[in-house]
Image (tube, grey):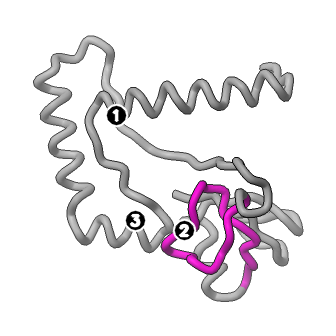
């Protein structure tokens, strides 16, 4: 799903004149003209909103997206992990599911458990740098 920077009157998803929202929460309002999308925060434009620029088009290198995944306990047997991975990837390949996710601004990133582990490691490293740079501390 692609986070979107929007501007518009206060709405159920936005309590200020400008806010950051996720595409599933805001895409209906954008399509209805109730919110104006300023940019998407992903590295590339959203297929669901192709006319909306990325923040990176104005601030090179900017990218902030989110993802969902399925995890299992560390010592789960490989055959169970493989079976789950196969079933999840099959579901994500289903044209109906793929089309619905795309309509909500989502991009399917099916892959292997190793691919997912790599994504988690990369995202952890990226956001750790942001947290350190911004001197963010737990409350």
Q: In what element is the residue under mark 1?
A: helix
* Disc 2: which residue: 46
**Residue 57, located in which quarter of the rendered image?**
bottom right
For label 2, the crowd category at 10 Å Cα-Cα, with few meaning under 14, some 14 to 19 and many 20 or more, is many
Residue beneath the point at 31% across and 25% down: 72
> Which secondary structure dominates the residues rendered in magenta?
loop
* Location of residue 36 with respect to 90 vertically, above or below: below
Residue beneath the point at 45% across and 44% down: 68
* Location of residue 74 with respect to 23 vertically, above or below: above
Determine which of the numbered discs, if any, sits on residue 115 in the image. Answer: 1
Q: Nearer the viewer, mark 3 or mark 2?
A: 2
Counting residues from the start of the chain, the first of labels 3 and 2 encountered is 2
User: Which stretch is magenta?
Assistant: 34-55
Question: Where does the C terminus fall, quadrant-wise?
Answer: top right
* Location of residue 104 with respect to 69 vertically, above or below: below
Q: In what element is the residue under mark 3?
A: helix
């Amino acid at each position: 799903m692609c986070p979107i920077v929007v501007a518009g009157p206060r709405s159920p998803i936005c309590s200020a004149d400008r806010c950051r929202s996720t595409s599933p929460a805001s895409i209906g309002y954008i399509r209805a003209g109730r919110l104006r999308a300023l940019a998407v925060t992903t590295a590339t434009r959203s297929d669901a909103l192709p006319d909306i620029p990325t923040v990176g088009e104005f601030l090179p290198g900017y990218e902030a997206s989110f993802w969902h995944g399925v995890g299992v306990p560390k010592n789960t047997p490989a055959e169970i992990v493989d079976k789950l991975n196969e079933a999840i990837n099959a579901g994500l390949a289903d044209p109906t599911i793929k089309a619905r996710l795309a309509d909500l601004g989502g991009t399917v990133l099916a892959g292997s458990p190793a691919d997912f582990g790599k994504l988690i490691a990369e995202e952890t490293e990226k956001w750790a740098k942001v947290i350190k740079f911004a001197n963010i501390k737990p409350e």
